[in-house]
Image (cartoon, rainbow, N blue to C red):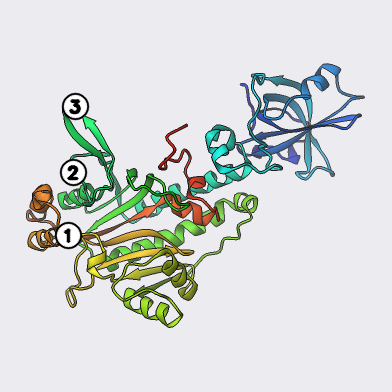
């Protein structure tokens, strides 16, 4: 095998064992009598130390490589009281697996900062940075723990189309594509399809899928291809799915704390379990206004309002019962006061991460809501008809993976939480 161990699999108890590690040259230092090579793979960094008086000259020469050379190192594990890990590797053979033919565009070690657009232009290099690695290690935990938690609660994973004939949420912010002789769009939401699955008797479903929003943003909070973690639940209202949401959000944070300690340390993030507060829209607005907020009753929340609510109620806040007029057309109006809806958002550290609601499952109410928004009822005929064929009360929510990752890792720009982000100006790499 080209590799026998990853860096994280080696320890001081392996003293005297022979291993072969593979990765990239993080640093090389020639101190005269000793040459140090730091080898990095995706699990960590190990120090390779060669004393010139005891190491064959060809091995010494093979260690004097440019940073980011891709190498394999056969070596003996040697206990060391000086090394941070308690051991170091003494090289027996160093191979340059693919000699560099072009300069590395920025300093991977982070000693010299690089602009985010330069890093994204060479994302395959940026992914070697320890900070970037830590971000996506944490995102992996988010995905895994989300899937595990909802599966334990009886949710079934489904796949739905990303090509649609009509807007699934209304509006005009859609990417148009040619679909043979017809016009189609990239889905802005799996909303229709996850509801149809529940109406079909699947009862509890979840999905992890990309969605596309053709909004012409140039902000640090928006990208145009987003990964959503969605659930839909039959025979349920908004309160039922809020309980699921609270379990998911707190459970994911606990799992990241448990599994990603070194990554959080690399990023300088101190993450703690958070209690989730639940507050009604009208109460949140009153409290904002009492504390100098400019929001008027009936308006949707701005970024400033979301920040203010988290400052007043805590890092995790579920805001419920928004005005019907500012929510998606399919949000169920409240039975006691139709001016408000059985809808909600989850805010985390001043940003909306989740939007959800009980859905309108009564055809006449749904048709009325579509007309009020000035949308074409005929375009939603299939959707309306489905509600008239035994649709149970149901509810769900949609969780933004990149935004959650951004806030968990304290990144300043959402593009840092997307492996290969797509925004208004970026279609490569």
What is the distance, in whole Å, between disc 3 and disc 1 at their CAs?
A: 31 Å
Q: First in sequence, mark 3 or 2: give its number.
A: 2
The mark lying in front, picked from 1 and 2, is 1
Q: Residue furthest bottom?
A: 290
Q: Residue at x 32, y 52 (%)?
A: 230
**Which element type, helix, strand or loop, lies under badge 2?**
loop
For residue 62, which quarter of the picture? top right
- The x, y position of residue 334, in whole percent, is 20, 72
Residue 254 lies, with reference to residue 157, above or below; the image says below
Q: Tags 1 and 2 in contact by the CB under 8 Å rule?
A: no
For residue 153, which quarter of the picture? bottom left
Q: Nearer the viewer, residue 342 or 244?
A: 342
Q: Residue at x 83, y 22 (%)?
A: 60
Which residue is label 2 attached to?
166
Q: Nearer the viewer, residue 11 or 112?
A: 112
**Which element type, helix, strand or loop, lies under badge 3?**
loop
Which disc number belongs to residue 180? Answer: 3
What is the distance, in whole Å, between disc 3 and disc 2 at their CAs?
A: 16 Å
- The x, y position of residue 226, in whole percent, is 38, 46
- The x, y position of residue 289, in whole percent, is 40, 80
Residue 68 lies, with reference to residue 262, above or below; the image says above
For residue 299, which quarter of the picture? bottom left
- The x, y position of residue 413, in whole percent, is 51, 50
Q: Is residue 141 left or right of residue 113?
A: left
């Amino acid at each position: 095998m080209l590799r026998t161990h990853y860096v994280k699999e080696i320890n001081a108890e392996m003293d005297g064992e022979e291993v072969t590690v593979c990765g990239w040259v993080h640093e090389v230092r020639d101190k005269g009598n000793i040459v140090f090579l730091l080898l990095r793979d995706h699990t960590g960094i190990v120090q390779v130390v060669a004393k010139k008086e005891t190491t064959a000259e060809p091995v010494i020469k093979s260690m004097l490589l440019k940073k980011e050379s891709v190498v394999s190192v056969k070596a003996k594990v040697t206990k060391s009281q000086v090394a941070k890990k308690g051991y170091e590797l003494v090289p027996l053979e160093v191979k340059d697996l693919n000699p560099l033919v072009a300069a590395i565009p920025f300093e991977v070690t982070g000693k010299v900062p690089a602009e985010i657009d330069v890093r994204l232009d060479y994302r395959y290099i940026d992914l070697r940075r320890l900070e970037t690695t830590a971000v996506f290690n944490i995102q992996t935990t988010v995905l895994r723990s989300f899937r595990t938690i909802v599966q334990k609660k009886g949710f079934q994973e489904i796949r739905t189309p990303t090509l649609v004939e009509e807007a699934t949420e209304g509006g005009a912010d859609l990417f148009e594509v040619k679909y043979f002789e017809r016009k189609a769009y990239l889905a802005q939401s799996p909303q229709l399809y996850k509801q149809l699955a529940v109406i079909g008797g699947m009862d509890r479903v979840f999905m992890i899928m990309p969605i596309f929003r053709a909004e012409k943003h140039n902000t640090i909070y928006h990208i145009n291809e987003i990964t959503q973690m969605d659930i839909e639940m039959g025979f349920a209202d908004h309160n039922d799915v809020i309980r699921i949401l609270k379990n998911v959000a707190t459970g994911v944070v606990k799992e990241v704390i448990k599994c990603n300690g070194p990554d959080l340390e690399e990023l300088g993030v101190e993450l703690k379990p958070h209690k989730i507060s639940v507050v009604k829209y009208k109460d949140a607005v009153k409290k904002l206004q009492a504390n100098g907020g400019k929001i008027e009753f009936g308006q949707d929340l701005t970024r400033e309002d979301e920040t203010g609510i988290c400052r007043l109620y805590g890092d995790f806040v579920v805001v419920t019962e928004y005005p019907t007029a500012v929510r998606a057309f399919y949000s169920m109006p409240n039975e006691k006061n139709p001016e408000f809806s059985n809808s909600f958002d989850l805010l985390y550290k001043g940003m909306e991460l989740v939007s959800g609601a009980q859905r309108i499952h009564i055809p006449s109410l749904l048709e009325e809501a579509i007309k009020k928004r000035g949308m074409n009822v005929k375009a939603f005929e299939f959707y309306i008809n489905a509600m008239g064929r035994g649709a149970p009360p149901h509810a769900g929510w949609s969780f933004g993976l990149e935004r959650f990752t951004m806030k968990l890792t304290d990144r300043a720009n959402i593009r840092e939480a997307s492996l290969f982000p797509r925004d208004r100006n970026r279609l490569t790499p």
